[in-house]
Amino acid sequence: MPLDPDSSSPPPHRDWFFPPAPPFLPSSRARTPFPSTSRSPKPYSLADRRPPPTLRSRSRSPHPTPEQQQPPPPPLPSAPRRRDLRYAGVRRGDVLTAAAEKKAPQTSAPVHGRKPAASAITPRWSEMLSAAVISLCLASLLRRNFSLHDQVCHLQEQLAVVTAKLQSCIIGSSLDMSNINLLHQDENNTMQTRSLKNFSLLISLSVLYAPLVILKYIGLVSKIRSSHDSEEVPINKRLAYKVDIFLSLHPYAKPLVLLVATLLLIALGGLALYGVTDDSLSDCLWLSWTFIADSGNHANAMGFGPKLVSVSISIGGMLVFAMMLGLVIDSISEKFDSLRKGRSEVIEQSHTLILGWSDKLGSLLNQIAIANESLGGGTIVVMAERNKEEMEADIAKMEFDLKGTSVICRSGSPLILADLKKVSVSKARAIVVLAEEGNADQSDARALRTVLSLTGVKEGLRGHIVVELSDLDNEVLVKLVGGDLVETVVAHDVIGRLMIQCARQPGLAQIWEDILGFENCEFYIKRWPKLDGMRFEDVLISFPDAVPCGIKVASYGGKIILNPDDCYVLQEGDEVIVIAEDDDTYAPAPLPKVRRGCLPKDFIVPKSPERILFCGWRRDMEDMIMVLDAFLAPGSELWMFNDVPEIDRERKLIDGGLDFGRLENIILVHREGNAVIRRHLESLPLESFDSILILADESVEDSAIQADSRSLATLLLIRDIQAKRLPYREAMVSHVPLGTFSEGSWIGEMQQASDKSVIISEILEHRTKNLLTMSKISDYVLSNELVSMALAMVAEDKQINDVLEELFAEQGNEMQIHPSDLYLKEDEELNFFEVILRARQRKEIVIGYRLEGAERAIINPTDKVSRRRWSPKDVFVVISEKE
């Protein structure tokens, strides 16, 4: 029966177990009548009235604690309580524990040499355990759901079998034993299929969660190893490094990873669907692919399992689609960026490859385009260390008519073999290496390295290499490296010698423009078997549309001989060098009937001392001085006017190889000053010079516009000073021909002054050429354009370089302009073939003429058989030996 809480004595039958309670309990449980927590008070029992021995002993102390002096709590108005033996020990243990906690010192410091118990489990390991527990819970729920589903299906199948048997019994027909066996076999197959579905579901889950567990295990092992050996690289970092190397080195790594991920997702999704649905494995794999391809296809799924699996596959499909979209966008962006920056490969054959960028590029492109016009156009590939868009924009600004030729620009370095292969260097028919602007030695050194790179191409070169050099001294080294593949054009020295020739014979620059360029007539070398056994004198009049000027002798290893003897007989293998409009516009014809005749007189124009002025300073000044010393008469003077100090001039000339003791015909006169300052020019006797050469100064030759502006300013100042110093200026100006500038104008005065001396200006930019052509106050040498023409001709046919080298050399043949009275008598009528035969008596070859009053010379006239009356002021352009 329940005990009364107010009663002071326990029942008699339990006095042996519970002693009388003390007047109060000195325990923590009795300090407050109500606990501070929100929990309801526990039921009070007699077991709680007996304090533990430890507390009982403390209550006998003479000095009780404040807790012991507190009065006992009043009894709780609760229901009658029962004494239960089961809770006696528990209550006693609680009291003992509370007492022990009060005695023990509360400190958070761990014992020395031991780690806290809480640090035994790291956060990563706890996360892994949490993930594993969650995964096991999900797997157990799925397994329970699927097992219940299997049991339901099994019961439905058994119910169907029993129903079939019952129906068979009712209608009185006995089942055949074979049908029963088939039913049992179907049942067994169904059980096997269900087991296979469960197994496929387990495999899919295992494959899905196995990488997570492995990665967690690898991280834990790496952390344990790193704690023992701090220098060892963790395994997970090494694996990540291997993955990074694989993705960065192999170009198809990312698409391959995406493909593997897609196939793996299809396989896992198909196995999971096969485990939760009744469809076949092939149908489930196809359904998995549809979920990946279109994330909205999972809306038709029925049941918890199929829905969960289909949603998971759809999420994976969205991730795969996002990765694929990112790869496609990156590939397209990289392709457009490669095209924009000129990094894509050029797949061409028999194209002209130009390496480098300079002011000569525009004229070079124009000349090559004109040469390819007869072939219907061609392809030119330009590779330089510049941005592709900038190169294309600069070429578009040149406004050249490319005549069907396409220009392809690529960005790269000619010193890198990979970049050379990118422009199909092994399949190019000609490779042109342009000189860089700036220091001549550095430019030639880079050209040498480029030739070394070209000769290192493993596939070999189909075409030849044309190298533009800045210094003649470096030509031997480049040819030593390149061998027979290399043809060099020393631009600076060629222009210097050409300017000297033009100074001695005004009008020669225009003739060189016509011959070097492809717009008019140029040199061609070709073999004609029908001419074998014919004397060269007869060969001269065998071409009605060309002018023969030399022979390429096969017996001498292909040596070029210009202006050979008339008695030379062509042998088998010999080729004829002609000046013609194009390589397919001429052919030999039967010999015409001509009259030979004799020369009117045989005289040699005596040389007289000349006075020549050089304005400016060039790198090849010593070479120009030596050429002039060979051409001029003894006692000639060469005035050098520039802002280089005289001491430095002599040092530079000596360093360049000039020996002042070897100068026989000229005397050097030095003047220091600025050629664009009028008072400096007025200190010179400008009216007394036979020829004045305005050179592109070395200090400004890197900028074509600045160099041309300086040359033009010097020219105008010289002409103005000359015009004001001429005697009888008013009378000479009054004789200005009609159609020119008005009387009294300063340009008219300059035109009259031009009859006194010849001024040759070196022009770098072709736009400056138009100004000089309209003003007609000076002859000019368009240096950059002439060099571009020479490079284009050698690129089309490397044999032409031998012809140009002889025409520009110090010895041998050269281009000259002679008056008509050397070949004709007064009022004599001859055709062009007869003039050619007359000139052969002087061992000269006439290639053209310029009529009186004509602005330009006619090279290789089309009508060579019609006779005409020649004027004494007509001149003929001939190839003859240097005097």
Image (tube, rainbow, N blue to C red):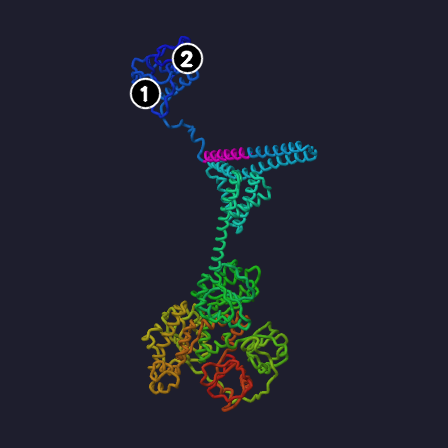
Query: Residues under labels 1 and 2: Cα distance?
Result: 29 Å
Q: Where is residue 241 in the image (x, y as percent from the top left)?
A: 49, 44
Which is closer to the viewer, label 1 or label 2?
A: 2
In-image side of 77 versus 180 (left or right):
left
Amino acid type indicated by mark 1: Thr
Looking at marks 1 and 2 on the same chain, the residue that comes earlier in the sequence is marked by 2
On whether residue 129 falls in the magenta region, the answer is yes
Q: Which of 386 and 160 is in front in this view?
A: 160
Residue density around tag 2, few if under 14, some if 14–19, many if 20 or more, within 10 Å: few
Residue 628 occupies quadrant: bottom left
Q: Quadrant of the N terminus?
A: top left
* Coordinates of residue 362 in the picture (x, y in percent): 46, 69
Residue at x 49% of width, y 91% of height: 826
Q: In the displayed image of the protein, which residue is found farthest to the bottom?
A: 827
Type of amino acid under label 2: Met
The magenta segment: 124-146
Residue 464 visible in this rendered orientation of the protein: no
Q: In the picture provided, is 153 more to the left or to the right than 517?
A: right
Q: Nearer the viewer, residue 831 or 679?
A: 831
Q: Mark 1 points at which residue?
A: 32
Q: Name the residue under label 2.
A: 1
